[in-house]
Amino acid sequence: MEGIEESFQELNCIPQDTRGATKHLLSLILDKIHPLILGLHNKLLSFESNGEEVLRLKEVYTLCSNQINKCLINLFEVLKLEAQERIHLQESRQCSLERLSWCIKRLLSIETYLDWKTEHTEHNDSANKSMNVSTMHFVNWIDHTFQVLGKLSDTVYQTDFKDAKQFTHEWKNEMVEYVTELHVSIDELLLSAMTLCRYCINDDQHIVKARCQVVLRETKALLGELIEGDLSSSIKATPDALKWPLMPSNVNVLIDVLKDVLYSLETNTNTALLALVVHCFSYSKPAIHILKEHFSNESKKPCSCLIKSKDDVTENCSFVKDFDLYNERLLQVGNFAVSCSSDQHRILTLRSGLASLEALDPHLVPALMMSAYSHHAKLLINSWTQEVQEIRDSIYLIVDPTAFAEKSKQMMHHKLLTILKENIYKNTDVCAVINIGCMVLDFFLVYDKCEPDALSHHDKLMVLVADLDKVQKECKIVSNLLSSNDDFIYEVKMPTNKKEVSMDQLTKRLKLLYTLINRIHILLCPKDNDDQLLEYEVGEEEQHQAFKNATHTVLKNFETYVNSPRKATNNMSRSIFGRTNVRSSTKNIPLSKLTKRFKAKMNTELSFSVQLDCLFNESRETNVTSEVALQIKNLDKLRENSLSVLYNFSPIKRPSLRKAVLNRQYKIPTMTNETIDKNVTYDNEAQMDATMSLQITGMSTFKSFIP
């Protein structure tokens, strides 16, 4: 393998002149990269009968090949810009070359492993450690939990064998196995839900957290009926620890209760996730443009993250934190969407887009900090924008249209009532309503372009969408006419003769915008035909905001009471990311794929992640609606690397990586007129070699993809 890797060292020897660099890169593609990808593809096909292991390798191969394709396109864009502007963009080259080099090395490691596998039949754990391992997500864990509860319920009633010692021993072992699996499933499920809770919008955080508390409480009640010991500490799940005799009727009542609260948790989690989708894609400005404007605004006081300091260069910048939060939310939404989709091409698009955002993360903020209008920053911004656009379209095509229309209508309903109640023009409130309307328009235009047959009542729906397009333009024009100098202005063709407009004219158009979205929802889901907003008085909005089949959580003296309808016999719950869903079966993701921490937990020891009880108890002392209170630091330790798609840029490691990139930018000479302060220094920990600035993990959080 060393000889093969040496042949790719030419990536580090690309000439500085644009013409020579282009020839060199084309030669590498034809002579080295393309033969490697094609040869590895053929080798993977020959191992088709090996099942799960090869599927995992194909997952790595497909994602890395897609990333290589993007890196090469980016490199040619850099070279094209160099030729046009007659400059040398070393940092832009290096950003793409690092990703390209890593992906090629990963493909070479797969090829070496396949060659070894051809000669050896025994299992090689050390070799598998270098390959990506798919992990289960919230959707998979909740489905798996229902499966375990079903098995546990059936086993409890097998009382005919309890008199025979042999059968009793086998029965007890089986019970211990199911109890342990249930414990692990609930533990992972709650950690996944609490991770999502960190990134939910404020209105949903306390609801998701309260549901998690109820699930933990009911799980402990069930386990307490099965196992002797204090579940608040570590106990052993062994045949001797089983309560004897068991009361099957009591156990099954507790199983039914746990199923109910699990359904409630998934309902609220899906609702929170859908609200997050609406929130992420209804911004007036893209998150990257907001950050760019912040760093390029020289009239204001310089940002604290630009001040030379030995501390983290971005820890005090609220704009950088907001941008990071936006990226993390995209990762959460994409993570859930992938776990719910059965369209392998769409899964690849999503995973590759999220991986690209991770790769851009350590470079983008430093580039904007150094010079927001530099060529390097422009290239990175364009790349980020394109990736987010692809991620958005893929998520739209996975989200259920009916659920999306309903949630958009609810969120617009709340914001519009605020405007009608105050009857005063506030740019942020008005733009929030208009942006939701524009987002719904984009949603159905993406469907109409990519999958028109997937929409019911397509012809009628497109008529409403066309009307929605006209009305949103009218709303933007009137909003622009009412706006002041500091307000957000929409880029829309304005009338030549500017007339005086009133707030009443704006509210009429906003009501019409809401009415069209409501009609879209009625068309897609006629059974949930809610009354029109205008039929209510403004003071009655709370009474009519609830929608059918909703679940409710009431917090009283820190005790959570659940009122949710009992679901039908089908144990597999339905996600709002469910249109294409033949949801990926958990049978293909056995518990053997758990992380080391949970593998160790399977050794008969029951102890919920510590920290779940502590997390819930700590926040009782604070305001449950406070976002700060719910950004739980202990979850960082539990989930440090679990959110990475391909590159290991966790929130914890992000600042040091950005320091390294900034430090490297100061060292690299650029052929521009900008001057750089050479006296800037950082602490020794930030001094990283250029080849180490892209740190990669061997873990992947997404499912297998078969090319």
Image (cartoon, rainbow, N blue to C red):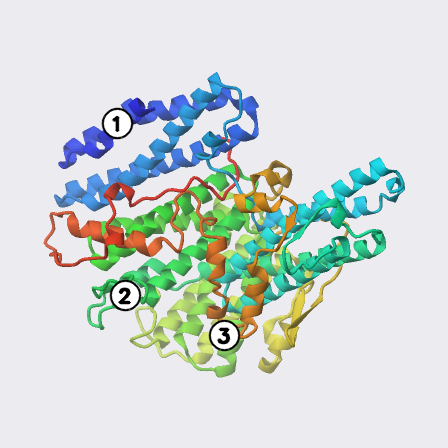
Q: Nearer the viewer, mark 1 or mark 3?
A: 1
Percent x, y of residue 482? 36, 77
On the picture, is 104 further left or further right than 459? left
Note whether 466 is above or below 669 in the view shown: below
Task: Kindly identify the amino acid type of the residue bearing the numbered disc 1.
Answer: Leu
SS class, disc 3 = helix
- Label 3 close to label 2 by CB (< 8 Å): no
Q: Is residue 51 above or below residue 416?
A: above
Q: Is residue 633 left or right of residue 574?
A: left
Q: Amino acid at mark 2?
A: His
Q: Amino acid at mark 3?
A: Lys
First-in-chain label (1 vs 3): 1
At a point 31% along the width and 67% down the height, the residue shown is 316
Secondary structure of residue under mark 1: helix
Residue hosting label 1: 28
Asked whether the beta carbons under mark 1 and mark 2 sit within 8 Å of each other, the answer is no
User: From this viewpoint, which residue is outermost toward the top?
Assistant: 119
- Label 1 vs 2, first from the N-terminus: 1
Choose the circle earlier in sequence order: 3 or 2: 2
Mark 2 — residue? 294
Outermost residue on the front side: it is 240
Residue at the (23%, 53%) spot, across then down: 684
Mark 3 surroundings within 10 Å by alpha-carbon count, few (fewer than 14), some (14 through 19), many (20 or more) = few
